[in-house]
Amino acid sequence: MRVDPERRRQYEEAYEAWQAQLEALHRVLLEGEPMDPPRLKGLLIRESRAKARYDEARLRLLGLDPSPKSGFVP
């Protein structure tokens, strides 16, 4: 399968950004790293947004339309 280099770059960047946020979240939730509630809320929001960007980039990489009007919900 041939992949557009720009879509690949966007996918890889989105994946790496999401993984960084997910690792930080896992340190708090699974390893017990202390974090005060406002910072935890910010971390949860950043992880959620990073995941959404990754999902959109993944759909574009696969040649699918990530817009809400397409009817496809990841």
Image: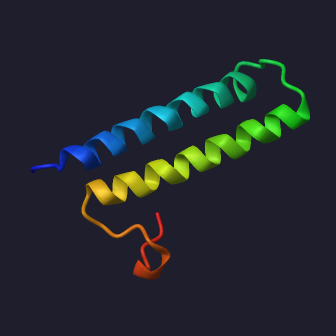
Measured along the vertical axis of the image, is residue 21 above or below residue 61?
above
Measured along the vertical axis of the image, is residue 6 above or below residue 64?
above
Nearer to the camera, 36 or 4: 4
Query: Would residue 3 be found to the left or right of residue 53 on screen?
Result: left
Nearer to the camera, 23 or 2: 2
**Residue farthest toward the left in the current orientation of the protein:** 1
Q: Position of residue 12 (x, y in %)?
A: 35, 37
**Residue farthest toward the front in the current orientation of the protein:** 6
Query: Would residue 60 be found to the left or right of residue 22 on screen?
Result: left
Measured along the vertical axis of the image, is residue 12 above or below residue 65?
above
Which residue appears at 35% of the width and 59% of the height? 59
Measured along the vertical axis of the image, is residue 14 above or below residue 65?
above
Which residue appears at 81% of the width and 34% of the height? 40
Nearer to the camera, 8 or 34: 8
Q: Position of residue 55 (x, y in %)?
A: 45, 54
Nearer to the camera, 9 or 2: 9
Which residue appears at 74% of the width and 25% of the height? 28
Query: Would residue 17 be found to the left or right of residue 61 on screen?
Result: right
